[in-house]
Amino acid sequence: MGVLQMLGLSPSKSDYKLRELVKNSYDSVQVVGRGTVKIDPNEVSSSEQFKKASVLAKAIVSRNKR
């Protein structure tokens, strides 16, 4: 780790990984401020991944009601 990274003036490896994660996720993702992430909820709720997770969640909840 360099001196600049220790002082927080240079991105770390985890910063680069996080940047790639955000870049490869939803189109509306924005990082604003320190650690604040904004995303369009309509984009998330219309994604196939969300729809599959929603079906699984409903199955888990209905199974636990018995």
Image: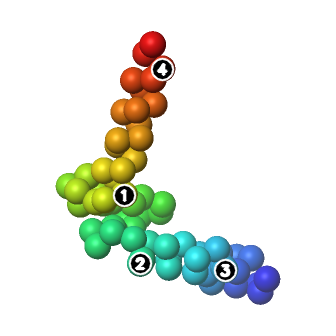
Indicate the position of residue 24 as horizontal and vertical percent values: 42, 77
Residue lying at 27% horizontally and 68% vertically, measured from the top left:
28
Disc number placed over residue 23 in the picture, else none = 2
Splitting the image into 4 quarters, where does residue 7 fall? bottom right
Q: Horizontally, is 38 left or right of 16 in the view?
A: left
Q: Earlier in the sequence, mark 2 or mark 4?
A: 2
Determine the secondary structure under disc 4: helix
Residue lying at 23% horizontally and 56% vertically, measured from the top left:
46
Q: Nearer the viewer, mark 3 or mark 4?
A: 4
Residue lying at 48% horizontally and 20% vertically, measured from the top left:
64
Residue type of the residue flagged with mark 4: Asn
Disc number placed over residue 13 in the picture, else none = 3
> How far is disc 4 from disc 1 in space, using C-alphas?
23 Å
Disc number placed over residue 64 in the picture, else none = 4
Q: Earlier in the sequence, mark 3 or mark 4?
A: 3
Q: Nearer the viewer, mark 1 or mark 3?
A: 1
Q: Nearer the viewer, residue 25 or 33?
A: 25
Q: Nearer the viewer, residue 9 or 25?
A: 25
Q: Nearer the viewer, residue 55 or 14?
A: 55
Q: Earlier in the sequence, mark 3 or mark 2?
A: 3
Q: Earlier in the sequence, mark 2 or mark 1?
A: 2
Residue type of the residue flagged with mark 2: Lys
Indicate the position of residue 38 as horizontal and vertical percent values: 33, 60
Q: Earlier in the sequence, mark 4 or mark 1?
A: 1
